[in-house]
């Protein structure tokens, strides 16, 4: 079998048992605990931003408090009334679905090459040959700024892909700035753009993935997306109405419910570092379904690659030493992709040993 096997084609072949590479070791597999008692008790926060169009700024004091408290206690929250029109969200979902519905030969035109450049279509990210595989196909590229797009891997089909992704990423960029200002407020910073500036300001980037979780004949044996924290600064994820995402809270996995029109926001490693650990990038993972396709559309708000990320100096004093070493985002990413998805170990490598 050649390099990439898409889980979509495995599912379409009608296999009854999953290939061994996808079968998790006992204890490691995801048990679909969607009906467990915990699922009803504990919920990640749902925050109403009261933004009806993104020109209404800044956020109210209570939204700022809710956001910073959720970022601190959970690292994950959902937002509603975020100002991104439902019609645009529907178009983002439509072009993503249309891409994955293209014949495999056509998708393979955009096949990921590996080796430093992860842009394109494929089934796994930088894990060793004998590692277990996730039950997930994906497409990845940089959408903003346009100069960073890997054009050789940019889909020509569906024909409105570019227009829709351009419009969506511009709106996400604005939302990102609004959320970042709230996070600055929660850190007690006088400059509400301190985080944005630390991430490169105008030079910041938006990377995106479209995740496709095919139906799986043995969903309890596999993992859709292995546990990881996100390497970026802040992730804004759109999901369809099929559950699958789980967040680690303490030592318990909590299901993230599907709320029509909502976006899931999570703190990435870079904001954990910049905030000197006040805001947490939390491990999350996804399970898959027996009879349903599940898709998700995360947008990764990312520093420009050569920016050096270290705890904001405004937060550092004698009582609060820096908990993380400075590193360029590029250096950070290299380590992230070399090590593969292993929970939060990659972040541990940047922790100051003395702290
Ligand atoms: C990711 C991610 C979760 C999901 O793309 O980083 O965590 O539910 N996705 O697809
Ligand atoms: Ni993630």
Image (tube, rainbow, N blue to C red):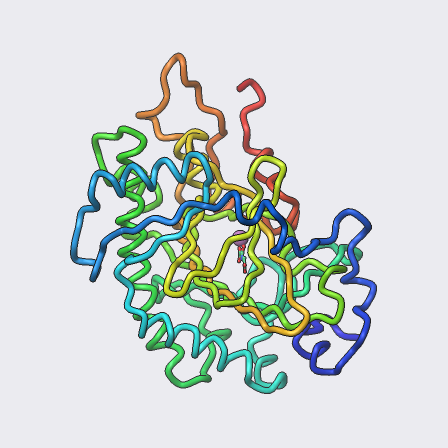
Identify the residue at the far top of this view: 318
Give the quadrant of the N terminus. bottom right
Residue 99: x percent and y percent? 50, 80
Residue 167: x percent and y percent? 30, 70
Judge whether 260 appears above or below 300 on screen.
below
Q: Is residue 340 left or right of residue 307?
A: right
Ligand 1: image quarter: bottom right
Judge whether 40 appears above or below 275 on screen.
below
Residue 30: x percent and y percent? 70, 53
Residue 134: x percent and y percent? 68, 61
Which residue is at a point 43% across and 78% down the rendered structure image? 94
Place residue 194 in its image quadrant.
Answer: top left
Which residue is at a point 31% across and 25% down the rendered structure image? 314
Instruction: Identify which residue, 8 or 146, lies in the foreground.
Output: 8
Instruction: Identify which residue, 216 or 320, lies in the foreground.
Output: 216
Which residue is at a point 38% across and 74% down the rendered structure image? 90
Instruction: Identify which residue, 172 or 328, lies in the foreground.
Output: 172
Total labels: the figure holds: 0
Which residue is at a point 49% across and 56% down the rendered structure image? 257
């Amino acid at each position: 079998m050649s390099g990439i096997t898409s889980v979509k084609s495995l599912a379409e072949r009608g296999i009854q048992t999953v290939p061994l590479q996808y079968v998790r070791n006992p204890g490691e597999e995801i048990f679909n605990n969607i009906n467990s008692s915990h699922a009803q008790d504990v919920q990640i926060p749902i925050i109403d931003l009261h933004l009806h169009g993104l020109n209404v700024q800044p956020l109210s004091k209570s939204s700022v408090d809710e956001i910073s408290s959720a970022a601190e206690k959970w690292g994950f929250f959902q937002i509603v009334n975020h100002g991104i029109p439902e019609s645009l969200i529907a178009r983002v979902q439509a072009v993503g679905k249309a891409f994955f519905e293209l014949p495999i030969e056509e998708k393979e035109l955009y096949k990921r090459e590996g080796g430093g450049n992860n842009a394109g279509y494929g089934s796994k990210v930088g894990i060793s040959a004998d590692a277990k595989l996730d039950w997930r196909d994906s497409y990845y590229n940089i959408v903003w700024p346009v100069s960073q797009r890997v054009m050789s891997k940019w889909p020509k089909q569906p024909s409105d892909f570019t227009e829709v992704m351009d419009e969506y990423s511009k709106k996400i960029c604005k939302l990102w700035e609004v959320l970042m200002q709230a996070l600055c407020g929660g850190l007690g910073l006088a400059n509400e753009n301190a985080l944005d500036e630390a991430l490169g300001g105008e030079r910041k980037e938006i990377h995106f993935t479209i995740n496709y979780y095919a139906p799986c004949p043995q969903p309890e044996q596999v993992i859709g997306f292995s546990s990881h924290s996100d390497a970026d600064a802040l992730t804004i994820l759109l999901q369809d109405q099929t559950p699958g995402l789980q967040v680690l809270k303490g030592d318990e996995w909590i299901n993230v419910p599907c709320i029509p029109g909502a976006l899931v926001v999570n703190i990435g490693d870079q904001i954990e570092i910049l905030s000197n650990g006040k805001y947490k990038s939390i491990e999350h993972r996804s399970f898959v379904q027996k009879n349903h396709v599940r898709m998700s559309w995360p947008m990764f708000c990312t520093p420009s690659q050569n920016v050096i990320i270290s705890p904001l100096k405004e937060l550092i004093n004698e009582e609060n030493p820096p908990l993380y070493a400075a590193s360029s985002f590029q250096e950070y990413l290299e380590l992230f992709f070399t090590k593969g998805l292993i929970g939060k170990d990659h972040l541990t490598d940047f922790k100051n040993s003395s702290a």
